[in-house]
Amino acid sequence: MKFFAPQIITGSGVQKERTIQVENGLITSIDFGSAADAINLNGSVIPGFVDIHCHGGGGFDSSVDPRAGEFHLKTGTTTMLASFVSEPINSIVAKLEKLEFARNVIGVHLEGPYISHAHCGAHKAEYLTNPIKSDLEKFVATKKVKHITIAPEIEGALDAIKYLSQNEVLVAIGHSAANSDVVNLAIDNGAKIVTHLYNGMKKDYSDKSTLIGSALHDSNLGLELILDGVHVPLQIIKDIIAAANTRIIGITDAAPFAGQVDGEYLLGELPVQVVDQVARLKTGGALAGSTLTMDKAFATAINLLGINPVDAVQMYCTRPAFYLAAKNVGDIAIGKKANFLVMNDEWQLKQVYFEGELVS
């Protein structure tokens, strides 16, 4: 099958008037000009979004229901991880063994239970624990866990980071009170990114002794960022991007109630109130995930923050795929999966193609 793209935008730049040839779900050629038998995509074509931090959507919990993945596929997320909140270890293992993946889900992200009590956010504190190798071995043995968030200051964390990194699990520093010295030790042991920068940590990003200050100014860590206008104030987002544009990883941190009307819901076992599409715990008022989708975040990056489209593609497609070591997604190039999106002039999503097939 052939597709004519008036404009292709990837993390490497812009190509005009290209015909994309797709066979068996993969891109086999990209040629200048339009073939007579090509489908005209009639818009800007970008790679499918890659979301490495997503708890659900459409009323479905990513940790138990593959329909969460299908919901996000329709909003442009052609590759994602199913994120879990903190639970007892045995419960996590049982869910991992049972969970069936949607076609766009390639693995699991465990946001807990190895996080700080002081910065646990919308995680149930009684389930937080310290990592021990026998539990980590259970996670690795499922071959489903691709990404784990850890507070590096807790007992056993540095050994856990080293073990997981050696077993090809992406480790993020997050929900943490770590100082810069501990952050550096975590990096030395294999930590590669930070979970939702600014959230779940001290917020003084001018202080280089804090997690956020160290990560932003004194490291090469990838930095997850939620662009929903709620989790991080607009001016602070601009400051973060100015300091670390080449390290930003756009995520949703979407909860199961993303795409649903305002009301009362659960995130894990915790009651949540959604008002004006902002989700907070009913007790304490902490933010409880987001109602964001990747297409909305991408449009916000360009239209509200003034990020150029190539950089936005790096944030939402290329860079998350790189950190996941997902080599066949995140780009429009020969040999990659034919996962691409068609956007209009306002950067709103028009069409989603997954492995060369239009997603209805």
Image (cartoon, rainbow, N blue to C red):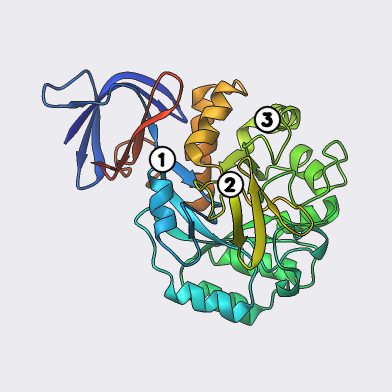
The quarter of the picture where residue 55 lies is bottom right
Kind of residue sitting beneath label 3:
Ile
The residue that label 1 is drawn on is 76
Residue in the picture at 39% in, 45% down: 329
The quarter of the picture where residue 182 lies is bottom right
First in sequence: mark 1 or mark 3? 1
**Image: 345 above or below 2:** above
Kind of residue sitting beneath label 2:
Asp
Left or right: 144, with 248 as reference point: left
Residue in the picture at 56% in, 74% down: 92
- In this orientation, which residue lies closer to the viewer: 329 or 358? 358
Percent x, y for residue 266? 60, 62
First in sequence: mark 2 or mark 3? 3
**Neighbours of disc 2 within 10 Å: few (<14), some (14-19), many (20+):** some
Comparing marks 2 and 1, which lies closer to the viewer? Answer: 2
Q: CA distance from mark 2 to mark 3?
A: 31 Å
* Residues under numbered marks 2 and 1 in contact, where contact means CB atoms less than 8 Å apart: no
Q: CA distance from mark 1 to mark 3?
A: 23 Å
Residue in the picture at 71% in, 70% down: 159
* Quadrant position of the N terminus in the picture: top left
Percent x, y for residue 164? 60, 67
**Image: 29 above or below 179:** above
Q: Secondary structure at mark 3?
A: helix
Label disc, if present, on residue 241 of the rendered structure: 3
Percent x, y for residue 318? 48, 39
